[in-house]
Amino acid sequence: MWIEGEVVGRVDWNDKLFSLQIKADIQPFIPGQFIKLSQVIDDKRVARAYSIVNPPGGDIIEVLAVSVEDGQLSPNLQQLKVGDKLDVSPKASGFMTLEEIPKASFSGKHLWLLATGTAVGPFISMLETHEPWNRFETVVLVYGVRLAEDLAYKEQLLRLEQAYPTQFKLVFSVTREDFPDAIQTRISTGIQTGEIQELVGIDITPQDSQVMLCGNPEMIADTNKILLHLGLAKNLRRAPGQITVEKYW
Ligand SMILES: Cc1cc2nc3c(=O)[nH]c(=O)nc-3n(C[C@H](O)[C@H](O)[C@H](O)COP(=O)(O)OP(=O)(O)OC[C@H]3O[C@@H](n4cnc5c(N)ncnc54)[C@H](O)[C@@H]3O)c2cc1C
Ligand SMILES: NC(=O)c1ccc[n+]([C@@H]2O[C@H](COP(=O)([O-])OP(=O)(O)OC[C@H]3O[C@@H](n4cnc5c(N)ncnc54)[C@H](OP(=O)(O)O)[C@@H]3O)[C@@H](O)[C@H]2O)c1
């Protein structure tokens, strides 16, 4: 059920937000998928899901996590040092992947990736492969955080923006402070008012757009309503649509 993982690197983005690089011999995964990390705490096994941030290849997996106040596992993960061991699920899971998105003949021109907080991770895994760039005319990432210091992987994303200057539209939403180069509006509000579409210069339509939403369940619920109103539909295997979601809690 579990294999041994060893922490081989870590990055502290701020006093709550951190990334762990874990050496673990997991089976091949698809960008967008998550693994489970686990520890036995007070004689009880605690296991939680964490999306993989890096693209496939190699035997290191990287996760981005926030230490949740009074959380069971995440404060422990934050304490892990290089060389520490933890349990890892041998197989990644999850359906928020580009494979689950209908092919280009069905509304595939623009890919919209909407993330709050740590949920930017699975999108980075996708963006670090060739697939989104080969499949979509435009790739939009809207990354919403409370404070600018919560913008993990900002430099990496800015490098991707330089690598794909016309194809990649990167929007930071920093909601609790004024930050240059970011909007201060929530993702849901920005889509509802059209502020985000105007900023990137494209509309969200059922004909042209695929939208993936990940992270805060309230953001997903609020934005989903707005997308349904715009004529988009949930993407199901039996009924292809344009909205694919993964809630973190
Ligand atoms: C498919 C999936 C993928 C996930 N990927 C990640 C990931 O890549 N990184 C990550 O940090 N978490 C991720 N999570 C959440 C993670 O599994 C844990 O729930 C989280 O680390 C809290 O665990 P805990 O035991 O410390 O807290 P618990 O005692 O289980 O408390 C849970 C509460 O913490 C809050 N919470 C949980 N996750 C987050 C979060 N990411 N950001 C803000 N608040 C949160 C919510 O209020 C939730 O009700 C994912 C969850 C799912 C279902
Ligand atoms: N980041 C911190 O400073 C901090 C401090 C103490 C504890 N924590 C812990 O960390 C956890 C996660 O915090 P987080 O900042 O990563 O995640 P978060 O609370 O999910 O916030 C991330 C982004 O999502 C936005 N958002 C929240 N609800 C939304 C909705 N209904 N529609 C659209 N957007 C919405 C937030 O906007 P708004 O700003 O408008 O809400 C923010 O821009 C908290 O639950 C807490 O346990 C974080």
Image (cartoon, rainbow, N blue to C red):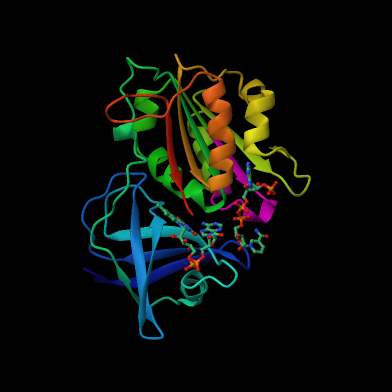
Most extreme residue toward the right is 178
Q: What count of labels does the image hold?
A: 0
User: Residue 169: percent from the left, percent from the top?
Assistant: 56, 29
Most extreme residue toward the bottom is 42
Residue drawn at 36 percent across, 80 percent down:
44
User: Residue 35: percent from the left, percent from the top?
Assistant: 33, 58
Q: For this view, does 63 lie left or right of residue 199?
A: left
Task: Write down the quadrant of residue 178 in the picture.
Answer: top right
Q: For this view, does 97 lie left or right of residue 192?
A: left
Q: Quadrant of the N terminus?
A: bottom left
Residue 42 appears anywhere in the view: yes
Task: Write down the quadrant of residue 238 in the picture.
Answer: top left
Q: For this view, does 205 lie left or right of residue 194?
A: left
The residues colored magenta run 141-155
Any magenta on residue 148? yes
Task: Write down the quadrant of residue 133 in the picture.
Answer: top left
User: Residue 135: percent from the left, percent from the top?
Assistant: 35, 24
| Residue 216 to residue 104: above or below | below
Residues 21 and 190: in front is 190
Residue drawn at 21 percent across, 56 percent down:
27
Residues 225 and 194: in front is 225
Residues 95 and 154: in front is 95
User: Residue 79: percent from the left, percent from the top?
Assistant: 50, 77
Residue drawn at 27 percent across, 50 percent down:
57
Residue 84 appears anywhere in the view: no
| Residue 136 to residue 224: above or below | above
Any magenta on residue 87? no
